[in-house]
């Protein structure tokens, strides 16, 4: 425990750690700002979008103008820059792909298209529809909030733990101060624990703080379960850092390997859906944040816990291997 | 030991680390794999939202359905939705307990949705409306129907391309950290300083080594991405931009490695500075959304790369190159200053003040140093202002006054640091040195904001004057031992001008 206390105290005083906490805070705050304000910008009357339409369809034009865009007919000459051109007969939309305004234009056209189509379909089919109990305000980016911001708030501290832990162990290897620990009577388990637990704890505390910050803007289900997921994810990645540190021959190599781990974690978001997708850490976190706990979430958490403990066991074995290489 | 020999040895060191090269290869492969995966996701996405097609959205909302209607099977096809079929009483009970996000009651004549008053209920309702729309439209011809991809594939490709081209620079620029921070830590740098090679040659060799390495990887990267759907109208132009950005990031890494007190700090600081540089250039690209500032967006490599991928044959961005090389030159000058201080060799972290003192030593003239420090102050200002903008927006909100005040204070303080180092003793000296700092600062700012160089003087003469006058006031204030008062006057003057601009363009 004394070793754990010493390591933890060093982490808290480490400027690199303090710097990383500041960077994480800025990143989360900017993402939340984007989540909150982008939607306001999207519906702001000051957002000037001009769309060209090839037909004088008054219903369509009225709907587009109600959504806040300016509509010009394709055969009209205008000095204004057109952000999107709609061909109503083929259904094609042409935009300037290098202009970020295109995204706004596409989103506006999409929402108008859906609204027009829906109202028409109800009327022609004589089908009534009503809704109640909806949230007020702009809710355009709900999926982004639960699918990207919350997972990022949980994954970032764990990734920082991975990176800082690698730096710490490799610098001890370089200065040869780790040899004193390796030749001491401390068990492999205690040594691995003292190297991982402080980073796991600091990452979990950070993760809990960011979850509390995110909850101010995004109402999250199961915050305590998210903190537990943070704990397991941190244990997984920090144990991985011990393994990487024991096999890497240089800090450079270790940095690249840790970057690759991060890339693999992010890449998991893009893999096609399969029966195992819901158990990937990032996807599991999104589900925990957005749902009441169910079987899938419980199984996912158990799998994450098992994986993290397996990784920790491998970390203990890496310590043993390091010991043998120094003896 | 000449520059060429040192570069050759540096390259041999990098190439001999096979595991590092293998790691880079794996990283490039993973990045390349993201292109078809993302394009695949786009090709199957539901209207209006890319995230709907990704597994991260699977089962995000739960809806309790009451009633038996074919619309329910349409709803079940949406991977974002998990449907629970039940009776009304149970459904309302599940809704109250929070186990479902909404209840959809449907029969042959109509349907109604009841939510919980949370954003996820809105998401659930949009899925229900989609399902109703799709079912009813089977028999109804819509008078307005868009192609489902909404042209997003092209947009995504052009947004993805800058990320794919610029983010590998993080890894390609790592060797310079090893060669500076670690050699300093191992005391190898003292051996190098004992050789006949000048500090300029030693530093230049390290940067050149990494640059050659990055350029080789850049050429390979440009060749590979075309097989994954990224083609450029002017590949040579993109390559030049990529190499210039690599040079900038490598030089910044060299700078932070020189001033960090240990390799750990150097690695972390380098990744932070690289992130800030890339974020800054992407942020400038966003200026394209406003017609008034669209031309300024040309100063972003992200804009140029996106235009190239979308097939536009845009002119080569010489202004962007100018900005990159100015920042690179100032970073190089600061790094050389760090190399020239004793603090560097003995692993003590030199602060900005010591770096300025190093510059004074190298340039041997207060006036030349003042001019150089003005450029340096501007380069340092940019990332600091970016952080300040984020903090102000989050803590206070979109307040124009507070934002402008914070930016003004940052700019005046960073210019004042240079005056503090130069220590003018007489009023005339203070005015001249302060004026030169402000002039350099204003000129760099103008180069960034007024890309049409031949009209730069006409458009930007007042801001340059304001910067010169405010720094001149601080210089005079320092000479008269009224530094703080002078700084406050400078901030007030600068802020008054900024508020005038806001009032004018409201």
Image (spheres, coloured by chain):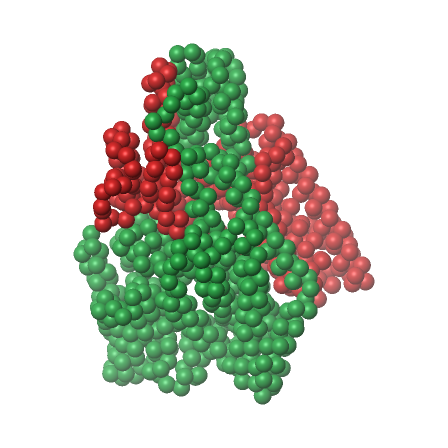
Chain colours: A red, B green
Q: Is residue B90 left or right of residue A165?
A: left
Q: Is residue B140 left or right of residue A272?
A: left
- Residue shown at 27%/55% (left/top)? B292
Q: Position of residue A21 (x, y in %)?
A: 50, 53
Q: Is residue B492 left or right of residue B301?
A: left
Q: Position of residue A104 (x, y in %)?
A: 35, 42
Q: Position of residue A1 (x, y in %)?
A: 67, 51
Q: Compare residues B198 and B73 and report the one nearer the observer.
A: B73
Image quadrant containing the C terminus of chain A = bottom right
User: Up-down: is B299 above or below B259?
Assistant: above
User: Up-down: is B493 above or below A95?
Assistant: below
User: Up-down: is A93 above or below A167?
Assistant: above
Q: Is residue B239 visible?
A: yes
Q: Compare residues B449 and B184 and report the one nearer the observer.
A: B449
Q: Position of residue B255 (x, y in %)?
A: 49, 70
Name the quadrant containing residue B383.
Answer: bottom left
Q: Is residue B335 left or right of residue A168?
A: left
Q: Compare residues B242 and B375 and report the one nearer the observer.
A: B242
Q: Is residue A47 visible?
A: no
Name the quadrant containing residue B266.
Answer: bottom right
- Residue shown at 80%/59% (left/top)? A324
- Residue shown at 34%/54% (left/top)? B287
- Residue shown at 78%/63% (left/top)? A326
How many numbered marks have been drawn onto this rendered protein structure? 0
User: Up-down: is B487 above or below A286?
Assistant: below
Q: Residue furthest bottom?
A: B196
């Amino acid at each position: 425990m004394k070793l754990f206390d010493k390591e933890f105290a060093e982490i808290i005083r480490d400027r690199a750690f303090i710097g990383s906490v500041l960077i994480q805070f800025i990143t989360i705050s900017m993402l939340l700002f984007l989540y909150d304000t982008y939607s306001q910008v999207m519906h702001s009357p000051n957002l000037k979008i001009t769309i060209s339409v090839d037909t004088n369809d008054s219903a369509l034009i009225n709907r587009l103008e109600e959504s806040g865009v300016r509509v010009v007919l394709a055969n009209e000459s205008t000095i204004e820059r057109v952000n999107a051109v709609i061909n109503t007969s083929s259904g094609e939309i042409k935009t300037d792909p290098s202009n970020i305004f295109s995204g706004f234009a596409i989103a506006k056209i999409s929402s108008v298209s859906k609204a027009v189509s829906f109202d028409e379909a109800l009327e022609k089919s004589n089908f009534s529809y009503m809704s109640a109990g909806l949230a007020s305000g702009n809710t355009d980016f709900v999926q982004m909030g639960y699918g990207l911001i919350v997972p990022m708030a949980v994954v970032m501290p764990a990734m920082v733990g991975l990176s800082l832990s690698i730096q710490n162990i490799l610098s001890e290897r370089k200065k040869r101060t780790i040899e004193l620990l390796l030749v001491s009577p401390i068990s492999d388990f205690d040594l691995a624990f003292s190297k991982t637990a402080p980073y796991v704890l600091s990452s979990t505390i950070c993760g809990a703080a960011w979850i509390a910050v995110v909850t101010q803007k995004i109402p999250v289900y199961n915050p305590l379960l998210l903190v537990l997921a943070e704990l397991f994810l941190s244990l997984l990645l920090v144990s991985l850092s011990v393994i990487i540190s024991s096999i890497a021959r240089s800090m450079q190599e270790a940095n690249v390997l840790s970057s690759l781990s991060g890339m693999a974690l992010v890449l998991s978001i893009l893999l096609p859906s399969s029966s195992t997708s819901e158990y990937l850490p990032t996807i599991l976190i999104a589900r925990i944040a957005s749902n009441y706990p169910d079987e899938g979430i419980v199984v996912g958490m158990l799998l994450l816990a098992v994986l993290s403990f397996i990784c920790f066991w491998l970390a203990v074995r890496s310590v043993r291997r390091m010991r043998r290489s120094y003896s | 030991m000449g520059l060429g020999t040192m570069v050759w040895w540096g390259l041999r060191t990098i190439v001999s680390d096979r595991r590092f090269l293998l790691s880079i290869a794996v990283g490039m492969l993973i990045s390349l794999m993201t292109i078809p995966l993302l394009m695949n996701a786009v090709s199957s996405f539901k209207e209006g939202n890319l995230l709907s097609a990704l597994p991260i959205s699977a089962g995000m909302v739960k809806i309790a359905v009451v009633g038996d209607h074919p619309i329910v099977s349409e709803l079940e096809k949406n991977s974002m939705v998990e449907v629970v079929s039940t009776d009304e009483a149970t459904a309302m009970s599940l809704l109250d307990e929070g186990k479902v996000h909404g209840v959809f009651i449907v029969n042959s004549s109509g349907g109604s949705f009841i939510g919980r008053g949370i954003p996820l209920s809105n998401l659930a309702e949009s899925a229900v409306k989609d399902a109703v729309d799709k079912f009813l439209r089977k028999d109804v011809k819509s008078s307005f129907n868009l192609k489902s991809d909404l042209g997003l594939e092209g947009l995504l490709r052009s947004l993805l391309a800058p990320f794919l081209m610029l983010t590998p620079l993080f890894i390609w620029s790592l060797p310079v950290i090893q060669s500076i921070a670690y050699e300093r830590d191992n005391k190898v740098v003292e051996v190098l300083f004992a050789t006949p090679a000048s500090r300029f040659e030693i530093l230049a060799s390290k940067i050149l080594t990494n640059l050659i390495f990055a350029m080789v990887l850049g050429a390979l990267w440009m060749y590979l991405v075309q097989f994954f759907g990224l083609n450029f109208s002017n590949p040579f132009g993109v390559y030049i931009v990529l190499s210039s950005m690599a040079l900038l990031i490598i030089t910044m890494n060299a700078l932070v490695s020189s001033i960090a007190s240990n390799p750990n700090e150097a690695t972390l600081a380098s990744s932070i500075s690289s992130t800030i540089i890339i974020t800054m250039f992407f942020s400038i690209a966003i200026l394209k959304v406003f017609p008034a500032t669209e031309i300024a967006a040309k100063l972003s490599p992200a804009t140029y790369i996106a235009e190239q991928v979308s097939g536009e044959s845009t002119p080569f961005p010489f202004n962007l190159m100018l900005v990159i090389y100015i920042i690179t030159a100032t970073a190089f000058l600061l790094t050389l200053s760090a190399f020239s201080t004793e603090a560097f060799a003995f692993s003590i972290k030199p602060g900005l003040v010591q770096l300025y003192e190093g510059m004074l030593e190298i340039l041997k003239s207060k006036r030349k140093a003042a001019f150089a420090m003005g450029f340096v102050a501007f380069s340092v200002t940019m990332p600091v202002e970016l952080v300040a903008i984020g903090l102000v927006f989050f803590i206070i909100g979109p307040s124009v006054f507070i934002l402008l005040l914070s930016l003004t204070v940052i700019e005046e303080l960073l210019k004042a640091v240079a005056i503090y180092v130069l220590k003018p003793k007489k009023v005339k000296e203070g005015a001249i040195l302060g004026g030169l700092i402000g002039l350099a600062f204003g000129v760099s700012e103008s180069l960034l904001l007024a890309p049409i160089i031949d009209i730069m003087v006409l458009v930007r003469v007042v801001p340059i004057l304001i910067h010169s006058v405010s720094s001149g006031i601080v210089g005079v204030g320092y000479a008269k031992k009224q530094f703080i008062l002078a700084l406050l006057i400078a901030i007030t003057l600068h802020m008054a001008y900024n508020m005038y601009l806001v009032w004018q363009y409201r």
